[in-house]
Amino acid sequence: MYNKNKENILLHIFVAFILSSISYLLIYKNKWLAIIIVSCFFVYYIFMSITEKRVFYILLSLFFIIPIINNSIYYNIEFENREVVRILKTYGYGGLGEIEGRKVYLSGDIGNVSIGSKIEAVGEFIYDANIEKGTVGDYNLKSIEIMPLDLKGRLFKVREDIFNKIKEKIGGRRAALVTSIAFGYDEFLDKEDEDVMKNLGVLHAISVSGLHMALVYSLLKKLLGEKTAILVSIFYVLFTGAAASTVRSYIMLLILSLAPRLKRNYNPIASLSLAGIILIIYKPYSIFEIGFQLSFLATLGIIIFNKDLNKKLYKLPKVLREGTAISLAAQVFTIPFMILYFREFSIGFLLGNLILIPLINLIVILGNVIVLFYNLPIVFNYLSFLLYYSTLGIDYLSDKLLVFLPKSFYLNDLMAVAYIILMISAYFYNKGYKRAIYFNLIFLVYLVVNIYSPIPKIEYYKEGVVTISYKGEKEIFLLKKGINIEKYKKISLSNNINKDFNVINLKGRGKIYRDKNNLILNYNNKEYLINLSKGKIASNYDIIDCKYSSYSKIILFNNDVLVFN
């Protein structure tokens, strides 16, 4: 187990950044809760500065302010009627873009503009910040003009061209799997492939992660040497779209490389913390992204538990021991977040990782090497041949694993909270605080409140499911056909299914009306449009935007409508 007696200053700063970012979000959600968090932070560190007689704790309070200022700069923005926009995603009508480093939703026809390209847009900006998504509002497009490709645009174009060329050789579905695994081009990834990988607990491996960065860097280091590998790896980070997990991994590898030259010992916790600090400064919203959270939590688990697990599994062969230890260590802190985000957990993740990861690693290497031989048909065709049979291998092994491994089972946030509380209780209990066992009572209170739900709670799932909880009753409302009803029965702990409805009565607290593909909430003599569709809308209602979220929770508290996307 990782142990460091010397106080880790960067870890304290990283925690301060996390709490500060959450506080900034809560200012818009629940001001009193934000005040409580900020007050507790300052009281604790002022108390520590007095008792420990260290100025560091006072300085740490100043670090708490930095993310708040950074967030304020990011979100307090207005755009002109003519702006340069980089396209990040495209939808049926509009997409997601970036203006001056800030994300905006685009409404209007953007034609066949490639992802990564820049356009000169004429339109109107409507400020509507969503801190959890990192968006500052909507930009309604009136006309666009495609601009020449810059470096980033060219890199995205290369990815698209490589996908199309591999597609000619091995087919669209396999090409999408290869490019998603190798360098994060997942625009055409088959939903069935995604579900299979999720059931086998290796979903993280089919999108670019720290694992891919470490693998590519290791290969480059052997071929080119450490210094050159660090420099070349920057292009891989950019080529993959600079996802949080890839940037995190690169920063940690860079620090690992520089430590001996600077005559410093490598501290993985400090390295992880510095990576987090840099990412939060660069992208204030990154702390709320699932990729950021899972990447940092998995890495933290590996740092803390991997060595001890390796020792405990000493009887196993080295390859099996190391693979098992790292898979288990990576899951320790990510399990509750996986449950919260995906509402399911794969019990077969260990076998899935042990059997499929070696083949996936081969695709990472081959899929990136093939980029270098794009204009050499003989080599390109041979590598395509190898990739074809590598994907055949994944299909074969996946099919065999799915036959005897249990399917992912569905869970709700109660299980996630229970897991977190049990972990905290076990930690303090092992530290000698025997009364920590009573900490589990918190879960019982949470369980009762969650099941009874004294205030109305509306939950929306992107598959087309709405659940309403209030005063001991929970009902499920289906907005679409072909929904896995059994899944949502288990998630919501309810058997009350409503397929056809026009009005939902909230026991005198309000009503919800069905309006084509959206919902209208009537609460406290005010009407809100719960926007679930990605088409153009024209409405005089206050908008509760859920169309870009996989899961949204709406809580009706006193006179307020609290939205969590």
Image (cartoon, helix red, strand yellow):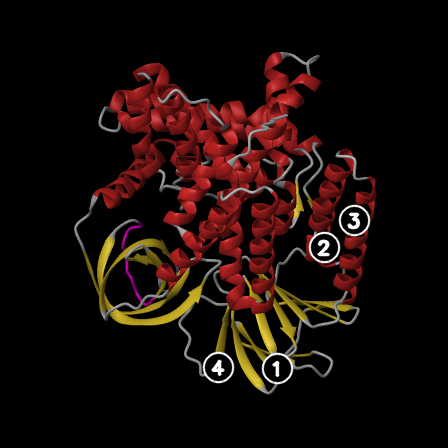
The residue pinned by badge 1 equals 523
Q: Earlier in the sequence, mark 3 or mark 1?
A: 3
The residue pinned by badge 4 equals 541
Give the SS element for disc 4.
Answer: loop
C-alpha separation, residue under disc 2 versus residue under disc 1: 30 Å
Residue 97 position within the rendered picture, expressed as x and y whole percent measured from the top left: 33, 58
User: Identity of the amino acid at label 3?
Assistant: Phe
Front tag of 2 and 3: 3
C-alpha separation, residue under disc 3 versus residue under disc 1: 36 Å
The residue pinned by badge 3 equals 439
Give the SS element for disc 3.
Answer: helix
Viewer-closest of 130 and 236: 130
The residue pinned by badge 2 equals 486
Q: Which residues are magenta?
A: 107-115
Assess whether mark 3 and mark 2 are in contact (beta carbons under 8 angstroms): no
Q: Is 201 placed above or below 77 here?
A: above
Q: Earlier in the sequence, mark 2 or mark 3?
A: 3
C-alpha separation, residue under disc 4 versus residue under disc 1: 12 Å
Give the SS element for disc 2.
Answer: helix
Task: Report the residue at 35% width, 28% height from top.
Answer: 368
Q: Earlier in the sequence, mark 2 or mark 4?
A: 2
The image quarter containing residue 481 is bottom right
Assess whether mark 4 and mark 3 are in contact (beta carbons under 8 angstroms): no
